[in-house]
Image: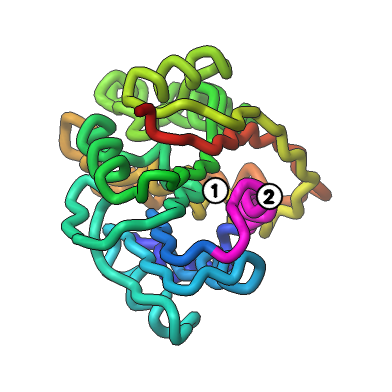
Amino acid sequence: MNYDQDYCTNGFVQYDAALELLTLIPFEPSNLLDIGCGSGKVTALICDQRKPCRVTGIDSSPVMIKEAQRLYPLPNVTYTESSIEGLNTRDEFDVITSNSSFQWFRDYSKAFKNIRSSLTEDGVFVVQASCRQQWCPTINHLMDVFFDALYPALKPHFHFPCMHLDSLDEYRQFFLTHGFTPSTLYIKEFEYQLSPDDFLKVFKSGGFKAYSYEQWFDVPLPESYTQNLLDYFEQFAVGKSCIPIVMPRLFAQLKPMS
């Protein structure tokens, strides 16, 4: 199953965090790169609120790129299928953004190298990402119960694909190690009281990708695993008036070290 086509609707937590990210993006950049542009919804928001002259949105999912081209065909925006690690461009950007994609980078050394080489001398890299190992305590707990109850033998073979650090000091050192100085760095918790439908949307917008794709396991998944996972979350949500969740998010504005 692939929920990329539903991301524009399901990803409202990521969109709320993007509204906060806007405060770190300089006004009227000449050339902006949006890493992990997804459905284009946040790219369009950045265009509306920060008025960049030109924008390139990249995403490694061809489905996402097609959705962005269909939903947000803006005249100054080019959508391109690419990961940040595989980026091949001669363009220079005075702003590079990553909204809810930074934790998914596969090779941070290569990613930071490409970001650094693509920034102008005074350019900035602006990040919003989920953080902490308990990136959503409610979903973390439910996944532990799910594995223990239905797939205890499978649990040791799962490797969480996202990079999460727990403290600002850890992130600061991580950025410095990769050649970037944080000019702004903080963690903000987003709290929600969700309806059952919205809770499932939150899970499908990120957690499902993390926990259901076979590439994150070192053994083949049982045929029934994915459907059982969805059924489990749906059954948990049934009959509840609201489900409280907390989502800690990292915000950073970074400048390359000279």
Kindly indicate the quadrant of the structure image that contains residue 65: bottom left
Q: Is residue 204 visible?
A: yes
Q: Please name the amino acid that badge 1 sits on.
A: Phe
Residue 228: x %, y % from top left: 42, 46
- Is 26 included in the stretch rendered in magenta? yes
User: In terms of secondary structure, where does tag 2 sit?
Assistant: helix
Quadrant in which the N terminus appears: bottom left
Q: Residue furthest right?
A: 241
Residue 25 falls left or right of residue 78:
right
Badge 1 crowding class, 10 Å Cα cut-off, few under 14, some 14 to 19, many 20 or more, is some
72 or 212: which is nearer to us? 72
Badge 2 crowding class, 10 Å Cα cut-off, few under 14, some 14 to 19, many 20 or more, is few
Residue 82: x %, y % from top left: 24, 59
Q: Which residues are magenta?
A: 12-28
* Dot 1 or dot 2, earlier in sequence: 2
Residue 148: x %, y % from top left: 44, 22
Mark 2, residue position: 23
- Disc 1 vs disc 2: which is toward the camera? 2
Mark 1, residue position: 203
